Amino acid sequence: MSDVPHGAVTRSAKLATLPLGFAGRTALGLGRRIGGASAEIVAQEIQRRTADQVFKVLGELKGGAMKLGQALSIFEAALPPEVAGPYRATLTRLQDAAPPLPASVVHRVLTEQLGDDWRENFLEFDDRPSAAASIGQVHRAVWHDGREVAVKIQYPGAGKALISDFNQLSRLGKLFGALLPGLDLKPVLAELKERVAEELDYFKEAEAQQAFAEEFRDDPDFRVPAVIAANEQVLVTEWMTGTPLSKIITDGTQEERNHAGLLFVRFLFCSPARVGMLHADPHPGNFRLMEDGRLGVLDFGAVNRMPGGHPVAFGRLTRIFNQGDMDTVVRGLRAEGFIRPHIEVDVDALRAFLAPYVEPTRVEEFSFSREWLREQAANVADLRPNNVVRQLNLPASYVLIHRVHAAGVGVLCQLGATARFRDEVVRWVPGFADDPGAPETAPLALG
């Protein structure tokens, strides 16, 4: 069914290799220091090898461990290319090549969830999955009223494996502290565990998707398939055709890239204001460019509920950053928990780290590119103890916001899109437009 190690003993044993390996490398480092190697060189080597082992084990486990690895991957610019590169490749392989469930297991799940007469719901049902991911797969079918539908089926045992991973990972805070001294891992894990529990709940996913579908019904820019039926492990929605964003990335014209990039940004920024939720899994596989020019959006298992829209602080301190007042930005980051009280950061390094998120808002039109992103990453790509990336904390309330914005920048650079992205920030993010009367001390959301 899957290459995920499902046995609790097996998974625990794999996770247990992390602290043991770290202890061994620390002892080795002490021996080398006694032998005359500099403390800084030894520390960097320990961090490098620990990072390598952490990412290797997280990638092998997939499930909850892989999701933590994805959340921490926003810090990957602090890791050496020889570690970060294989880690990204492992995650891509696991996500894109998940082995499908056998038809017999699919039929068993459908019988358990929909009853012995489950076939009566469908005029046709394709046993071959059209897509497979980390916790479930999608089948194409025809509903009993003739509508083409997507049937999403959750892997049996996925929930137990995910929760088990998070319980084990909660014991590894000190290990990750060695990699990222500014990171408080426990609230990050708690937030991820809560969100993954929601992702496993297809009733909640159906509720979120239907809210998006109703808000964007007949919208000139977006289409979200309506929900037709839902159960604990089965979700049936309208089928949606279109060119995957991944295909636009590889083969699209520049006009298509620009158009898709602008709609992609518009969707991410307008959704909190219009729906009170942020789509929290913005990888290219979840988006389609339709023949009528609209952007189709799929997979609402991971959403960040933001009933008040984007925080005013996000827009306000983005504007202040653009004005060059880094002292206010630093105070705001401290107030929000991105810089913990015992951590001192280099302001120039912090400015370089924030640039990829803020620079596109400075100009009327901006061009994203892989070359630009590599230049930005080069500014923070080292493992020295004072590296600003390693010193920053990720407050639980911003885990998904930051993940979305970091991933969004990556998608836009893959597209190589050029458009008036600043207009979307002005329109949808409160506090970004000049507001001389507003206090200038509120915190900034990283991302």
Image: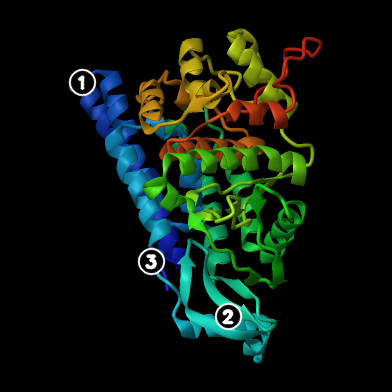
- Label 1, label 3: how far apart the Cα atoms are: 41 Å
Three-letter amino acid code at the position of disc 2 = Val
Q: Nearer the viewer, mark 2 or mark 1?
A: 2
User: Residue, x 31% and y 26% (percent of image)?
Assistant: 44
**Horizontal and vertical percent for residue 147?**
65, 76
SS label for mark 1? loop
Label 2's element?
Answer: helix
Which mark is nearer the camera, 3 or 2?
2
Residue at the far right in the pictured view: 437
Q: Which residue is mark 3?
A: 3
Q: Position of residue 54 (x, y in %)?
A: 38, 44
In the picture, the quarter occupied by the N terminus is bottom left
Identify the element where label 3 is drawn. Answer: loop
Residue under pointer 1: 37
Disc 2 to disc 1, C-alpha distance:
58 Å
Residue 200 as seen in the image, left or right of residue 33: right
Residue 289 in the figure: left or right of residue 253: right
Q: CB under 8 Å between callouts 1 and 3?
A: no
Which residue was labeled with disc 2? 109
Q: Looking at the image, is 147 positioned above or below residue 104?
A: above
Q: Residue at x 42, y 32 (%)?
A: 178
Asked where in the image residue 117 lies, by quadrant, the reply is bottom right
Q: Residues within 10 Å of mark 1 (few under 14, many from 20)?
A: few
| Residue 25 screen position, x and y as percent | 29, 37
Which comes sooner in the sequence, label 1 or label 3?
3
Q: Quadrant of the C terminus?
A: top right
